Image: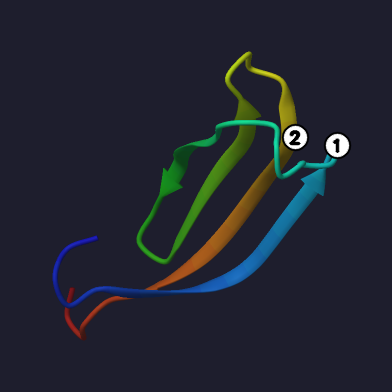
Amino acid sequence: LPAGVYYSTLEVHVNFVRALRANMGEVRCEAEIIHVGRTTATAQARLVDSEGKLYAHSTTTCIIFRPDGE
């Protein structure tokens, strides 16, 4: 978002598919923005291991606050 534009979370939904273990190695979060409009934005993410095995997936919706007149 541009400078002076702020956001707050409206909703977060997380689905945990399987447990993470301390000795399992590297995991990464793959995230993408789905939509950015004037007043709301949505995104999704996936938590996967080095082989691409899914551990969790999530979506979020945020409200966007713009300075007056924009």
57 left or right, relative to 1: right
Query: What is the spatial separation of the Cα atoms under label 1 and label 2, in whole angstroms?
Result: 5 Å
Residue at position x 82%, y 45% in the image? 16
Residue shown at the point (76%, 42%) measured from the top left: 20
Q: Quadrant of residue 33?
A: top left
Q: Residue at x 60, y 71 (%)?
A: 10
Query: Residue 18's mark?
Result: 1
The spot of residue 53 in percent (x, y) is 71, 20
Residue at image position (63%, 36%) is 47
The answer to which of 40 and 19 lies nearer the viewer is 19
Q: Which structural element holds mark 1? A: loop
Residue corresponding to mark 2: 55
Element class at badge 2: strand
Q: Is residue 27 above or below residue 35?
A: above
- Give how far across and how far down residue 39 sits, in percent: 42, 66
Residue at the front extreme of this rendering: 23
Answer with the quarter of the image where residue 69 lies: bottom left
On screen, 12 above or below 68? above
Say whether residue 32 is left or right of residue 3: right
Residue 57 sits in which quadrant? Answer: top right
Q: Amino acid at mark 2?
A: Tyr
Quadrant in the picture for the C terminus: bottom left
Q: Residues within 10 Å of mark 2 (few under 14, many from 20)?
A: some
Image marks 1 and 2: residues in contact by CB distance under 8 Å: yes
Q: Position of residue 12 (x, y in %)?
A: 67, 62
